[in-house]
Amino acid sequence: MTEMAEQLPAESKPKKKFEFPSAFTILFLLLVLIAAATFIIPAGTYDYNEDGEPVPGTYHEVPSNPQKLLVSALKGPINGMYGIEDETGNVDVWNYGELFGAIDVAMFVLIIGGFLGVTMKTGAINAGIAWVVEKLQGKEKWMFPILMTIFAIGGTSYGMAEETLAFYALIITVMLAAGYDGLSAAALILLGAGIGVLGSTINPFATGIASGFAGTTISEGLIGRLIILVIGTALGIWFVVRYAEKVKQDPSKSLIHDQKAANEAQFMTGGSGSEFGEFTGRHKVILALFFLAFVVMVYGVIPWSDLGLSVPTWWWWFPEMTANFLFFGILIGLIGRLGEKQLVDTFIDGARDMLGVALIIGVARGITVIMNNGLITDTVLFWAEQAVSGLSSVAFIIVTYLLYLPLSFLIPSSSGLATVSMPIMAPLSEFAGVPSYLVVTAYQTANGLINLITPTSAVVMGGLAIARVGYGVWLRFVWPLLLLLAVLSIVVLAGGVLVS
């Protein structure tokens, strides 16, 4: 008996579960690994043309310049923000724009965070969606196409993700009352916003950042991304409605049928729905200004004169886009009657929420700095050039898409993945005769697909937890749609190569 008592505490200790490292940890490990690689990989360089593009066939080796492991790991993120070190070890702060520094991108992200924070504080977005839900009482079937379209617009325009968590309780309650299940509600929200992000058209956190580091503009490749957005959203709506109607006709068909009574007790008693307040005229004006900010951004970055159109070209990029969102953030705060102190505090809080994203960009950009300082970037490009030299342009873009799938699992941060990969993949596309904007599309569609299921995503795991849907159930439910979205992305990418 004594021996048994002594064994119980040891046996009752819970086993530690493996937790996947955060994006920060992965990127810092990469910093050290890349610094170590500068001791092994031969140094080399291409000749570059006047547009700064590597000239195929001109690669040649140069004396090596290995980087110090610890110093490079610690200084890499800082140098990544400003630019590339010169041979004396001094950061060329004043030319960071030409040297692909990340400080302008990081500032853009922080200001966007403040802009979103102020807009959310006014309650306009929440009240608008709650108003749509209320109007559709008794016509719940129409909630699927309408709300999924609204969430998709949020995803494609500003990367709507964490903001969706506020709507689960409200939408699940309505869905259960209408005879659907919690999985239907979770799929409506997760797939609506997620497919919008996958088909990002003007999303500054995915398309904007990737375009900046790829040396292209946010407007190039817009048509292809619109096709993915529209068809992908339609596929998502069809997929979710098909399942939801089957559950409504026969509740036993629900993948979470065994939780039906518990879910109804959880959400349909005690008023678990969220209160978002009345949708006022002021809210409508704020939403109009919110979307106008993105319209102005798109207009500002499109080179109208290069398209042969007699429309004023503003030649905007990150500094101007940042100022644009700063202006609209202040304007929305004033119209929302936040008051001077509340407006400033809310803007700062919103920017604070994006601080992690801004830091990830710096860390990721530090990897490129180390590679450039160690003179191995062009060597990696040369090896990759040899690897794809036998591939057609279509094969190259498909391989690029497939490559981004595991990369997106390792680095789920869309901004971090764009920052670390575009300096390599964009020049590589020139060798294959593929426009760099298609590489941006390949990156964002692959990253968007993986972020619909990655267990490291707080949006995925948090949303499923609220809806009381197991992760295994979600994978079993969503995998056919993932295949359809992957095929759609590949077809659009291949078509983009053929018409370019």
Image (cartoon, rainbow, N blue to C red):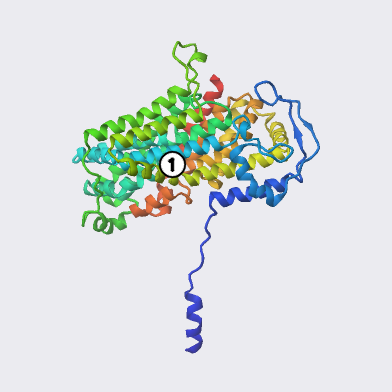
* Above/below status of 419 relative to 59: below
**307 or 467: nearer the eye?**
307
Q: Residue at 53% across / 55% down in the picture?
A: 20
**122 or 48: nearer the eye?**
122
Q: Residue at 42% across / 52% down in the picture?
A: 461
Q: Residue furthest toward the right?
A: 63
Relative to 26, 58 lies left or right: right
Q: Residue furthest toward the bottom?
A: 1
Q: Secondary structure at mark 1?
A: helix
Q: Quadrant of residue 56?
A: top right
Q: Position of residue 371 (x, y in %)?
A: 68, 40
Q: Residue at 28% across / 56% down in the picture?
A: 263
Instruction: Give neighbour class at mark 1: few <14, some 14-19, many 20+ (Cα, 10 Å).
Output: few
Q: Residue furthest toward the left?
A: 138
Q: Position of residue 254 (x, y in %)?
A: 31, 50
* Residue type, numbered disc 1: Pro
Relative to 290, 379 lies left or right: right
Relative to 111, 337 lies left or right: left
Q: Quadrant of residue 230?
A: top left
Residue that numbered label 1 is attached to: 480
Q: Position of residue 223 (x, y in %)?
A: 46, 23
Residue 88, can we see it? yes
